[in-house]
Amino acid sequence: MPSVSVVNGRAIVIEQLSAPQRVARFFLAPFTQTWHHRDLVEAILRRELQERFKGSVAGWVWAVIAPLMMLGVYAFAFTTTTKLPIEVSGSRLGYALFIFSGIIVFNFFSEVAFRAPMLLHEYSHFIKQTIFPSHMLAIISTLRATAYSGIALIVMMLFQVLTGHGLPWTCLLLPLILVPYLMFLMGLAWILSAIGAFTRDAGYLMMTIVPLFMFITPIFFSHTQLPEPLDFWIYANGLTGFAEVTRDLTLLGKIPSLAVYAWTMFVSIFTFYLGYWFFDRYRNVIVDVI
């Protein structure tokens, strides 16, 4: 039974939950809170998407032009006589798609990682002056990045069809990696935004280390090309599994390795709840430091 305390003449109900109930509430909290604030999330997300290309004549056409130009450059560069490791993709044009699929995963990550440390500072006027659910900002920023990366993914698939590569049936399984990747990035955004509220060094750190992930993630190469034990330890980089599973589903048309997918799911869920716990722990202090 919950206990009742009286503070300043008002009855305050204090729930007495068992350990399993507290655990269940913790795991459900990110989803129940997002549903509770869904109107606010939708409103802010719509505003951010409208402002992304504000002042531009072409607007969201740039979101299509940019990946098209990138694919065009890759296709031109990798269909020349340059010696390339095409064994990972079967053809030179396939290698261009191989790289582009990895770039989509990396750009999705980099957009969230670059913005997250300053995210709370962007909305400091709301956080300080109103009762604002600051923990929703990580979700909103991740969904904002999803729109841009989603367009790039669609462009890649259309390019596959137009160049005769076709789309494998495994593309239908893309949500099985997209949802875990969103959870991974949301958890990362929670961690970085909380740290960034206390020190702006988090932003400078991201500007330093995020570009390095492009070269320690199998974007330009396959993990099978690495010698032992590097072909195993490359999975310590959380992006590796997401990049490989995305390629398997969209380009290679095969079911991903169960071990790789299980590890990717673990990284995703662990980062998501660690980020939520970390942000929630310091949420009440953030108002005083930003």
Image (tube, rainbow, N blue to C red):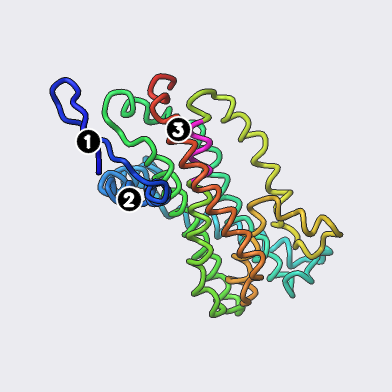
Q: Distance between the residues labelled 3 and 2?
A: 18 Å
Earlier residue among tags 1 and 3: 1
The amino acid beneath tag 2 is Thr
Most foreground residue, 95 or 41 = 41
Mark nearer the viewer, 1 or 2:
1
| Residue beneath disc 1 | 13
Image quarter of residue 131: top left
Please check the rendered image and state whether residue 189 is part of the magenta-colored stretch, yes or no.
yes
SS at mark 2? helix
Identify the residue at the far left of this view: 9
Earlier residue among tags 1 and 2: 1
Q: Position of residue 258 (x, y in %)?
A: 64, 70
Most foreground residue, 39 or 214 = 39
| Residue beneath disc 2 | 32
The amino acid beneath tag 1 is Val
| Residue beneath disc 3 | 281
Asked if marks 1 and 3 touch (Cβ < 8 Å), the reply is: no
Q: How far apart are marks 1 and 3 (CA)?
A: 22 Å
User: Which region of the structure is painted magenta?
Assistant: 187-194
Q: Position of residue 285 (x, y in %)?
A: 42, 24
Residue at 67 percent across and 37 percent down: it is 209
Task: Say whether residue 220 is left or right of residue 138.
Answer: right
Examine the rendered structure and indicate whether residue 159 appears above or below residue 34: below
Q: Quadrant of the C terminus?
A: top left
Examine the rendered structure and indicate whether residue 142 appears above or below residue 225: above
Asked if marks 1 and 2 touch (Cβ < 8 Å), the reply is: no
Circle 2 Cα neighbour tier, 10 Å, few/some/many (<14 / 14–19 / ≥20): few
Name the dominant secondary structure of the magenta segment.
helix
SS at mark 3? helix
Examine the rendered structure and indicate whether residue 4 appears above or below residue 138: above
Most foreground residue, 6 or 192 = 6
